[in-house]
Amino acid sequence: MIKSGDLRVFDPILSTATITGDHGYAIYDTLFALNSKFTPQPQMVGKWSASDDKKTYTFELRNGLGWHDGTPVTAADCVASIRRWGQVAPGGKLIMARAKDISKKDEQTFTIELKEPLGLLIDVLANLANPFLFIMREKDASRPATEQVTANIGSGPFKFNEALAKPGASFTYDRNEKYVPRDDPSDGFAGGKVVNVDRVIWENISNPQTAFAALQAGEVDFLEGPPADLYPAVESDPNLALQVLDKMGWVNLLRLNCLQKPFDNVKARQAMLYLVDQAVIARVINPDPKYSHPVTSMFGNDTLYSNDENTGWYKKGGDPEKAKQLFKEGGYAGEKVVILQPTNLMGLSNAAQFLAAALRKIGINAELAPSDWGGVVTRRTNKGSVEEGGWSILITGVPDSTLSDPIGAPWLGAEGDKGFFGWPKIDEYEALRAQWADTPTVAERQVLARKMQAVWWDYVPTVLLGQGITPSARRKTLTGLIGMPGALPMWNMQKA
Amino acid sequence: MAAYIVRRMLSTIAVMAMVGIFIFLLLRLSPGDPAAIIAGDAATPQMIAGIREQLGLNDPLPAQFLHWALGILSGDFGGSIFTGRPVLLLISQRLQPTISLSILTMIVSVTVGVAFGILAAWRVGGVFDRTLAAFAALGFSVPVFVVGYFLIYWFAISVRWLPVQGYQPVEHGLGPWLVHLILPTVALSFPYIAYFARITRASILEVLSEDYMRTAAAKGASSYSMLFHHALKNAGVPILTVIGISFAYLISGVVITETVFNIPGVGRLVVDAINNRDYPIIQGVLILASGLYVLVNLAVDLTYTLIDPRIRY
């Protein structure tokens, strides 16, 4: 298999990289998992219950769980893993803040005692936003969350083959013969994780043309996210197929630096909503119209909470005259607008250039700051002015599925300079967001989502550029791939 | 001679030390933060700050340099910031592909390039000479990756004689090792064959115009004897110089070929490390490469004495 990117960090709690999450799903297991309808299902947990006052949850592990080193999985491992995950994951932090006690009761049982009920506890444990709650051995999970676990010993359906690991070149995963799958059928990330292949090798072929040639020649079976210009070549090859595994895809967006001029002014932020024509810029990023769609809800497209609240006023975008007027009303006085341009991510790099040209056309002093993604992720942490090495606009992409999770997705926060890059501060929104975890039903959360979105688009912390779906290419002999957003599991797949 | 070799070896240490200081400062002063890359796209600023602290990236630069330099002096090149694996292990995993590709390329390039150059000089102005001129122009102007893609298309996808990509270690068998290296070697040799052929041709033509060659002809020496016993030996010094320099360039310049043919060599290791800001790997490879560069030059200088008895150190 050829993955998108290179596995650089093994610890799925330390890193939020998608490929590290995939590695996590291969070798670790989870307490709960989302099925294809995004409903949490027990995975490592056999039985669980909540007390009548919903303050004490008791979890009992199912039988047969064992680490790759031969020792059994215990409740103490789960407790340590939850605590470590709770240091970094937004959902985990929420649980830690609410928890009175998390402790093991016996070798297979542990409890979470809460100070006050948390209606979404199980949903948070089965979270869909990286970092996922993978269960590690107690001795690994006892490390600080900022210190990498490199042991690669999990209890999941695949074992990491340390002897064949060649960082930067290839990683090998062997079937865990001792893994006991659940009896129920595979469904999303949930159900029985049955491994039908003896070994999976992740080849790191960074050159897309070579990767595609290797797929054509049958040297590899799967190519994750080939460039759009290769889609016709895949479709014309009788041995290959394009398959959309993550139907929700990614939403590309602009983060505006709300701490610095000109985007510390709401008029300038609103101007950006008028300026951006998603129909055009989405095509710049993803040229095939079959795989790109406009998106106007802050909760993404086709999620449980997508809605049209407060979107009517800017919906069409592509109105440079209105944008120019708003910049003027916002007191724009020729300040430099620096756009971070990730040159090694073609789609986002193109979008940055397109945006800079659109801004210059309406008299904005736009300047590109080109660097590789490594440079972008560094510079985006700078809260200073552009003269001090800061920035004005960050172009990035987030999984559409995460936009339904205002607890787990940091880009849906608005807590100011302690929050995600761009640092919007909207107290009214934060007060509404705080109610999310205690809003028990989907219908009630949908009402809450509309209120949150009304405030969000008044403030404009982000500007959406559209939803992009990226199909993968596979040889037709490889079947049974699980289509879920956020990660690509390897169980269930078969090779003829 | 022995004193000369010792002096040159000592200079190698000085060169490596200077490279070490320069690279260390260059990396630390360049934009980029490995902690931000480790943490990933969805990381919060707090996560990044925690990782920076854990990795010691907040320590003062002199302290970081001292820690690294003392490690090098004790033979410890440190570990990858990302995977935690020892730098020397990572480099050793990548050395064999790069050295295999470089040596095979050099053998093919020197053999074919020098032979073509001799033939062209022997029949200067003839059909072969003119054909070689055209070939050399192509070799210099067509990028290696273009040649690589053509070779992949014809030999790996169309007729399926050879694999598209990858590398098999020599311990898995000489056959698979060679089969995986044929296309990359041909692609990478293309410009070097052109270069060596042109240099050989020019050097031999220069020697052929010397008085002593005319004297040899007057004494009845055969064309073969004139070309191989007199001309080639005297033209050898500039050819050897070019080959030595090219070998050093080759080792540091195989990155594109390694990328096109997905060969897990040192070149790709460095490029990935630069993208990730994995400082210990970049520093380790460059320190070793600088040492190798100096040693290759020393070897070339010593070989001069074998070709030209007038040269003594």
Image (cartoon, rainbow, N blue to C red):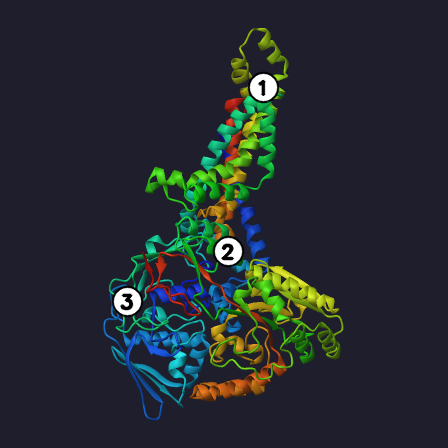
Residue in view at x 66 percent, y 78 percent: A270
From this viewpoint, is residue A309 visible?
A: yes
Residue matched to label 2: A232
Q: Provide residue B228's location: percent of width, then percent of height.
A: 52, 18
Residue matched to label 1: B123
From this viewpoint, is residue B76 visible?
A: no
Subunit of mark 1? B
Subunit of mark 2? A
Dots 1 and 3 on the same chain:
no
Q: Provide residue A220's location: percent of width, then percent of height.
A: 39, 52
Front label number (2 vs 1): 2
Subunit of mark 3? A
Give the amino acid at mark 3.
Trp
Q: Is residue A277 above or below residue B279?
A: below
Give the amino acid at mark 1.
Arg
Q: Provide residue A315's location: percent of width, then percent of height.
A: 62, 77
- In the rendering, which numbered label is found on residue A67? 3
